[in-house]
Amino acid sequence: MIRVRVRFFAMIREITGVEDLWLELPEPATATVFWEQLTNRYPELQPYRHQSRLAVNQEYASGDLLLRDGDEVGIIPPVSGG
Amino acid sequence: MARSTHSFSPEEMARYSRHLVLPEIGPAGQEKIRRARVLVVGAGGLGCPVLMYLAAAGVGTLGIVDDDRVELTNLQRQVLYDESHLGRLKAEAAAGKLSDMNSQITTIPYPERLTSRNALTLFARYDIIVDATDNFPTRYLINDACVLTDKPDVYGAVYRFEGQVSVFNWGKGTDHRGPNYRDLFPEPPPPELVPGCAEGGVLGVLPGIVGALQATEVLKLITGTGEVLSGKVLMLDARTMAFQTIRFCRDPNNPLTGTHPTIRELIDYEWFCRHPASSENTIPEISVEELEAWRRSGKPFQLIDVRQPFEKEIVTLGGDLIPETEIDQRAHHIRKDVPVVVYCRSGIRSARVVQRLKEKGGYANIYNLKGGILAYIQRFKPDWPVY
């Protein structure tokens, strides 16, 4: 198992009620594994999965993501206000 | 100091003296600012500070696109307007105010909605486009039109206490352009998932901060100063004053600028944002007309108001008040033996509640009132108060 630090923004932060948390993931820790673990904990995040991007260590992640122990994963939802 | 190529009048020398003495701007930079043509789409919370700073800086031509009128709810953050502007077209009120601030610049109001029909012609007349809008369809439209006309898109967006800023499509020529909005967010979210300012609220000063950042990027683009926020999105949170930038690249799957583009002209953005390709959940909804027919027919159903109690005091359609925040604790008040219609102000919170109850299971016959009480008032009770 590895541990990653997850950071939340905007609506997603309001759903989780916390700014960040540590999440344990089995290996290989792909984006799919990450979302499965996270939505197990917060089922309400399921609808945001397709529209929110993951940023690993302040860099946008591409499709074949593999998380490592200690990575910081930001979930960036689109916002539209102006 | 100034060579003859930069002919500034004594008034201009005085007005822009703090720019003229900046080594990074100087007379050459100020001349570029004077010649610049910037189009600001949206003259609301973000557009006001963008326009004010660009007008003060001496941007020679400022276009203002907005088809809204000034409302009282705007004055908490839209600092170009005052009480005397209530009811006036924002584009025209803004143009007038900016000319008062700086009579040496040209302001061009476009009191119309930006659409797939007018965007390309309009963008072609400007050097830089500022996305200061408040909705996803227009954000995708601006992005795509900027790519098609080869203009930089200076993007800003806010949510409650948080903001995002970036510069899209920067750099000339297809191969050298920076990433764009579709690289950051390939797909719009289902409308019910992301409340705008009217539904979610916004700290009044927040669009001021984000708009000032956008104006900064515009001046950097014009003068070639510093490092443009291209390929990076700045995320800021006013609660903690945490600012961080996240790097992103061009996505080969981008339908506009990827390796196999499928979009070569502007599309119907309202439709695109209502039907995101990967949307798994459709929220059952009924129109205000259907609701009215149900009421008149005496059909048994339960009406639930998920707004806050103070909103019910302003105006109500009746029914049981269960604020969105209390739905989980009070779900047993929601009937399963008759159809249930859920409403709020504009239909966004109630859509979330319908989705949540559907996910909980057991509520097969539950509907969101499309457009909320505002749509009902507009259709049936034009004399009722709106807020």
Image: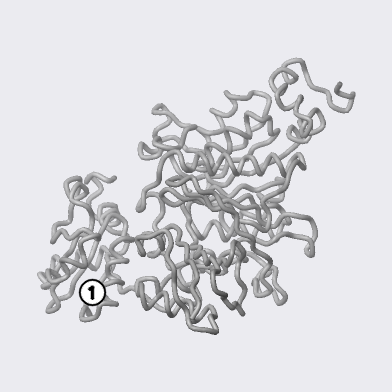
Q: Position of residue B371 (x, y in %)?
A: 32, 60
Image quadrant where residue B289 sits: bottom left
Q: Give the residue at mark 1.
A: B366
Query: Which quarter of the figure is the C terminus of chain B placed in?
Result: top left
Query: Which quarter of the figure is the N terminus of chain B placed in?
Result: top right
Q: Which residue is situated farthest in the top direction here?
A: B10
Horizontally, residue B154 falls left or right of residue B356, namely: right
Up/down of B43 relative to A60, above or below = above
Q: Chain under label 1?
A: B
Horizontally, residue B348 falls left or right of residue B323, namely: right
Horizontally, residue B363 falls left or right of residue B187, namely: left
Q: Position of residue B78 (x, y in %)?
A: 46, 37
Per the image, label 1 sits on a secondary structure element best described as: strand
Q: Which is more toward the observer, A63 or B37?
A: A63
Q: How is the image coloured?
A: one colour
Q: Which is more toward the observer, B233 or B356?
A: B233
Q: Position of residue B111 (x, y in %)?
A: 53, 42
Up/down of B88 relative to B363, above or below = above
Q: Position of residue B28 (x, y in %)?
A: 82, 32
Image quadrant where residue B6 sits: top right
